[in-house]
Amino acid sequence: MKKLGQILVEEGWLAPAKVNQALQHQQIFGGRLGTCLLELNLISEERLGKALVKQCNAPLASVEDLRSIPEPVLQMVPSRMAYKSKVIPFDRYSTEARVAMISTQDLILQDELAFVTSKRLKIYVAPEIRILEALEKHYGCDIDQRYQRIWDRLNRARYLWQDSPTVGRAPGTPEAAQTRPESAELPTMEAPPSVEVGHQKTEWSPEAAPHLEQPALVAPPTGPSAEEKEPEPEPAPTPPPPAVAPPVEAAPPTEPPTVVEPPAAVEEVAPPEPKPLPSSAQEESVSTRPMPSMTAPETEEGLERLMMEVEERDHIAHALVLYLSERFGRVLCFMVRGDEVAGWMGTGRDVDESLLEGFRLDFDSPSLFLNIKAGVPIYRGPVPRMEAHEQLVQIWGGRYPRECILVPVHIKGRLVAVLYLDKGGRALGGVDLGEVQRIGRLTGRAFEAFLVRRKQR
């Protein structure tokens, strides 16, 4: 079997001097050669994977394969054995189990795994850094901070793939999305979202959601109070100069020190509205949106019945939040409107609802939401420290969660909403991703049924 460095040099992906640099790094810090190459940023993860496939003569376990693994599959291999042997089971069939490992030449280990799983093994190869990431995520193993820094950097790079047409393209494109038939529909996603109901087309517009109309009147600095004061400078030139002077002097302070004017406007608007004041939102750490009294559904069937019976679209999201809040620390719903994603509804620890409703993010910026729009069926992993995510984590105080889940909601193949779930500083071990995906599809059907009922009315 050829050595990894030799393969990289033969393929023309790395100079011999760079291989020697990585080998010296390996002697000092340890780890596999591929890990050292990634740590020194000497090679892309895509090329490392191709080299491992050629070296081990085994298929490659992709990042998505190791990220979303059902709990019954993980239970086939005890955590102690998985950590000691650096192996990850990620799929199974009636008589076959698929296992990713660092070294595919260890036949004794393969015999032990076949005995433990009682299945015929299909061996896959994976970089050491991805095996360690999966061990930390699924089995809760303690992994050295050195490796965590490497996979955090790699994960951040995966969301910038569209900016680099050469090296960054493959690592940033989830492999599941490369072969997914939905990718052919991506150009249609740029148009404003709409849904065909019968022979008519119903627009998915935020006007139907009353809670999305109000932030535009209260949150921005140019709210109702600013609009009322704008007409004053226009008639100012016609009256005598003494009468014009006070409005002209009063107008500039409303632009730079915007902190003074909005609170007064909020105090005037907030009493007749059912929404809490921004000050109360800052005092309370959990969302307190007044909604119709609802009992949290205990089962998926109960959630489906409730969402199919409600009269308003907001009530569908409210039922969804109630159901998922029993299982997650934070549950947020985001609405997709054309080329941006907007905050809608949510609850959880430290969630500031005024910041959630004011959240807006363009799909032009690389982010987790952009990957969901690109066709990723579900995302589970960390929130990369990127500029686009700073506004997101500010909704609950600016603390990055250990990992999160993003689930798309589609109507007729069009992305209309995104669900965000996390458990704060805790890992998401034991979460049934299949159930979460079913809930996402159920929510899409509930929205579609609501549009049909509205059309009939």
Image (cartoon, helix red, strand yellow):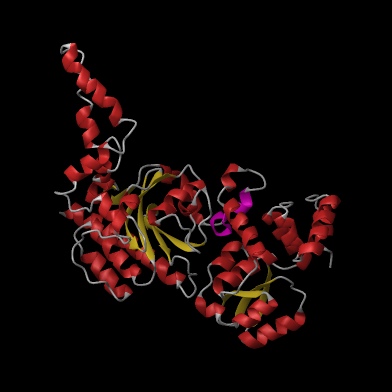
Left or right of 387? Residue 269 is left
Q: Residue at x 55, y 78 (%)?
A: 73
198 vs 4, nearest the viewer: 4
Q: Residue at x 21, y 65 (%)?
A: 309
Residue 146: x and y, percent?
66, 62
Query: Principal SS element in the magenta part?
Result: helix
Q: Quadrant of residue 207?
A: top left
Left or right of 404? Residue 165 is right
Residue 396: x and y, percent?
39, 57
Q: Residue at x 63, y 82 (%)?
A: 80
Which of the image's four quarters has the C terminus? bottom left
- Which stretch is magenta? 169-178
Residue 342: x and y, percent?
36, 48
* Residue 440 visible somewhere in the drawing: yes
Q: Is residue 170 shown in magenta?
A: yes
- Eyeballing the image, is 133 above or below 94? above
- Eyeballing the image, is 48 above or below 93? above
Left or right of 68? Residue 412 is left
Which of the image's four quarters has the N terminus? bottom right
Q: Residue at x 57, y 63 (%)?
A: 64
* Residue 198 visible somewhere in the drawing: no
397 vs 122, nearest the viewer: 397
320 vs 220, nearest the viewer: 220
